[in-house]
Amino acid sequence: MEKKPFISIITPVYNGESYIDDAVKSVIAQTFTDWELILVDDGSKDKSLSKCLDWSGKDSRIKTISLACNGGAGNARNMGMDLACGRYITFMDIDDVIEKDLYERVTQDVISDESIDMVVWGVTEDYVDETGAICNTNVLKLKDKLCDNVELVRKSVIFLEEKTLFGYQWNHLYKKDIIKDNDIKFENVVLYEDYFFNLSVIEHIKKMKISSFAGYHYRKRQGENVTNRFIPEYFVLSRRRIKSMVDMYKSWKLYSPVVKKVCGERYLRYILSGLMRNNMPEAEMSHEDKKRFVDSMYRDELYKMIGCNCPVDSKVLATLQTAINKKSTVAILTFGKMAYLGKVKMPGFFSKKVLM
C-alpha cells in the first residue's frame, strides 16, 4: 500500500507559466519531504499545463490536475482538496515562494501532537516592481502561542485578523478530517473566498498553534493588486467580511472593545477603498451615484454599530470617520477623489499605507 503523505499542498494555476518554476522549486527544496504537491491547472491559456506536467514527470510527489474551463481559484482548491491524501492540508499560490524550512518548522508541533487542528504562521509581503525586482518587504507575524482550548482559539482570531493573518489560506495548515467531515468548501466569490473558508473552519477548531515564522513570501506585484482593479462586488463583499466577524464573535459571546476596534477600523478602510473605487473610470458612476453611496453610509447599521465611535489610530481614517459622523458629503466625496489620485500617482505607498 502506498504511504500517504503527511501534508498535501494545493496550488491553483491559471496562466502562471512565468511563475511555476520558482514556486515548485521552493517546494522541492523543503527540508521537510513528506508532502504531495497538487497543481490544479484552471483552464490556462498559456503553457502552464505543459509546465505542470513536466514537473509531475520529474517528481512523483507532484500531481497535476487539468480543468477544462476556468472556474476560479476557489473551485480549483476544492478540486485539489477532493484528491488530497495528506493528513493535513495547506495551500500555495503559484506566484509566491516559500523558505526551505517552512514546512519543517510549522509541522514540528503537529507531528508530536496530532490533537492540534490547525497551525497559522506569519507572512513576508514582497512588493515587486514592473521589472520583477523586490522593492520593499513587510513582515506580518504574531508571537509563538499554543491555544489549547476552544476559548483561547476563538480569542486569538481577532489578533490574527488585526495582523491580516486570519484571512489567507496559504499560511494555514488544516487537519484534513475537519474539512472533510464538515464538508467545508471555498465559495465561488470574486473576493475573500479564503477568508470565508477560514470562518467556516474556525468554528470546528479546538486546538491551534500560532507560529511566529514568516517563511511564506506573498508576492504583491505592481498592477496586480486588488486595489488596482475595479470589482463591482467589492464593497458588498467587504461589508459581509466585517459583519461575519462581528456576528461570529457575538455568537461566541466574546464580542469586546478589542473586536469592535479591529473590525471598525478595518471597515473604515473598506469604506475609503470603496470611495476610491467609485472614481475609477470603469465604475462609470455619476456624481449622483457617488452621493447615493455616501448617503448609504449614513444609514448603515453596521457602521453605526462598530465604525462611528471606534478608536482609530490612522489620522486619515479618523478624519474620514469624523466626516461620515457629521454627514459632510462634500468632504467625503473629496476624500474619495484624493484617494483615487493617490492610487494613480503613488500606488505602492497607497496600497501599503492607506488601504488593505
Image (tube, rainbow, N blue to C red):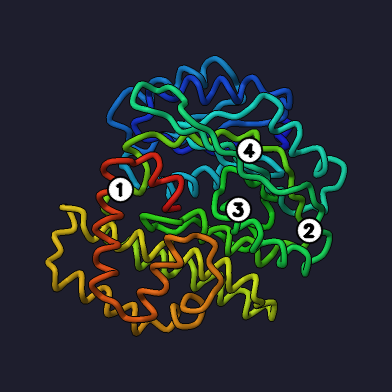
Q: Nearer the viewer, mark 3 or mark 2?
A: 3
Residue nearest the viewer, comparing 166 with 300: 300
Q: Which residue is mark 1?
A: 342
Q: Is residue 23 above or below residue 86?
A: above
User: Quadrant of residue 323 in the image?
Assistant: bottom left
Element on which disc 4 rests: strand
Where residue 18 appears, as percent x and y from the top left, is 38, 22
Mark 1 and mark 4 residues within 8 Å of each other at the beta carbon: no
Q: Which residue is mark 4?
A: 8
Q: Give me the disc on residue 207.
A: 2
Q: Give me the disc on residue 163.
A: 3
Q: Nearer the viewer, mark 1 or mark 3?
A: 1
Amino acid under label 3?
Lys
Query: At 66% from the left edge and 45% from the top edge, which residue is drawn?
Result: 141
Residue nearest the viewer, comparing 70 with 23: 23
Q: Nearer the viewer, mark 2 or mark 1?
A: 1
Q: Is residue 317 left or right of residue 158?
A: left
Q: Residues within 10 Å of mark 1 (few under 14, many from 20)?
A: some
Distance, label 3 to label 4, CA atoms, is 26 Å
Mark 2 and mark 4 residues within 8 Å of each other at the beta carbon: no
Name which of mark 1 and mark 3 comes first in the sequence: 3
Query: At 51% from the left edge and 61% from the top edge, which residue is drawn?
Result: 196
Name which of mark 1 and mark 4 comes first in the sequence: 4
